[in-house]
Image (cartoon, helix red, strand yellow):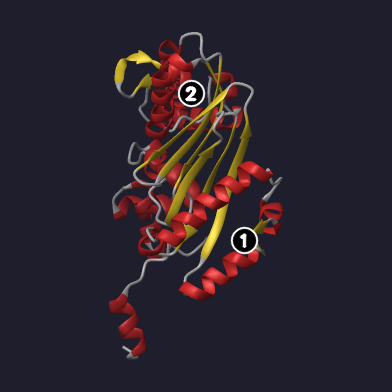
Amino acid sequence: MAEITASLVKELREKTGAGMMDCKKALAETGGDLEKAVDFLRTKGLADAAKKSSRVAAEGLVVTYMSDDLKNGAIVEINCETDFVAKTDDFIKFSNDICKLIADKKPADMDALMALDYEGLSVEKTIAEKVAKIGENIKIRRFAQYDAAGRLEAYIHAGGKIGVLVEFDNVCDTDKEVIRDVALHICAANPLCISDKDLDPAVIEHEKAIYIQKAKESGKPDNIIEKIVEGQVNKFKQESCLISQKFVKNPDESIAKLLGDKKVIRFTRYQLGEGIEKKKEDFAEEVRKQAGL
C-alpha cells in the first residue's frame, strides 16, 4: 500500500474541501490513489469534486482573436510564473500576437506553432529569449483555431482568467446580444459539451457508479435506488450540457430557449491554470532547511 503522506492528504483536501481525517481515511481505503480517494469522498457526500477540482493556480493569460468578418479566430492560453509578468505590456502584446498568428497561419499542432516566424525568429526562440530576459518561465500551453461557416463570438472574463471561442450557425446581425450572452454563459457555467448526445459515455458511467454506490450506502431497496440513480444521471446531463443548462442571467430560461433557431456548432473554453499544480513556497520551512533545523 502506498504511503499516506501529509502532502497527499493536503492535495486531496485542496481538491475536495473535505476534512483532514476524512481525507486520511479515503486515502487509506483506496491505497493512496488520489483519484479513487476523490470518488470515495464523493460517494460519502463529503466532496463536490466536479466543482472544486478546478481550484488550481497558474499565472498568465487566456486571449482570443477574431477576424473582421468573424469567420476566422483563435484562442490560446499562455502561462508564466507570476501575475506581475502576466500584467506587463510585453507579455500582453506577445499573447495577443501569438493568438493572431495562430488564426492567420493555422498551425496543426504545438510543434508547428513553435516553428512559425515571429518578428524574425521562430516562436520557440522568441520564448527562449523572453525567458532569459525576464528570468521567468513562459509556456504556450494550448490553443484552438476556428474557420467558421457561420460566425464566431469570443468572450474573455476577469482580464484573461477565462476565455471562450464559440462558432454559431443561423445567426444574423440582430442576434449579437444573444450570441454574446451565450458566450458569457459558457464562461460562467463551464458546460462539458453542447448536448447530451455529445457526452462521453465513459463520463456518464463514471458518474452513475458514484451515484449507485452512494445510494446503496443509504440502505434503500434496489427498485428505489434505480429511480434515484436515473434521476441523478438526468440531472447530471442537464447541468453538464450547454443547451439544457439554465441561463445564468435568467435561470427561468434554458440556453435552448435563448438560442431559438440559432445553433452552437462548437466551442472552446479555457480557464487559466486549469489542471496545473503550482508550486507553493513555504519560506519558513525553507529557512529551517537551510539552517539545518
Residue at 44% in and 24% down: 236
Q: How many marks?
A: 2
State the image coordinates of residue 138 (x, y, percent, origin top left).
Answer: 52, 63
Q: Residue furthest bottom?
A: 291
The residues bearing labels 1 and 2 have C-alpha atoms spaced at a distance of: 42 Å
Q: Please state which of residues 56 and 66 is positioned toward the viewer in this rendering.
A: 66
Q: Give the mark nearer the N terminus: 1 vs 2.
A: 1
The answer to whether marks 1 and 2 mark residues whose Cβ atoms lie closer than 8 Å is: no
x, y (%) of residue 180?
A: 41, 25
Q: Which residue is mark 2?
A: 241
- The residue carrying pointer 2 sits among few (fewer than 14), some (14 to 19) or many (20 or more) residues within 10 Å by Cα, namely many
| Residue lying at 37% horizontally and 33% vertically, measured from the top left | 188
Question: Is any part of residue 39 visible from this angle?
Answer: yes
Q: Secondary structure at mark 1?
A: loop
Q: Residue at x 55, y 32 (%)?
A: 203
Name the amino acid, label 1.
Glu
- Give, as a three-letter code, the residue at label 2: Cys
| Percent x, y of residue 33 | 51, 53
Q: What is the crowding at mark 1: few (fewer than 14 residues within 10 Å), some, or many (at least 20)?
A: few
In the displayed orientation, state which residue is furthest to the top. 261
SS class of the residue under badge 2? loop
Q: Is residue 17 above or below residue 262?
A: below
Is 74 located above or below residue 189 in the figure?
below
User: In which quarter of the view is residue 219 placed?
Assistant: top left
Q: Decide if residue 222 is in sight here.
A: no
Q: Which residue is mark 1?
A: 119
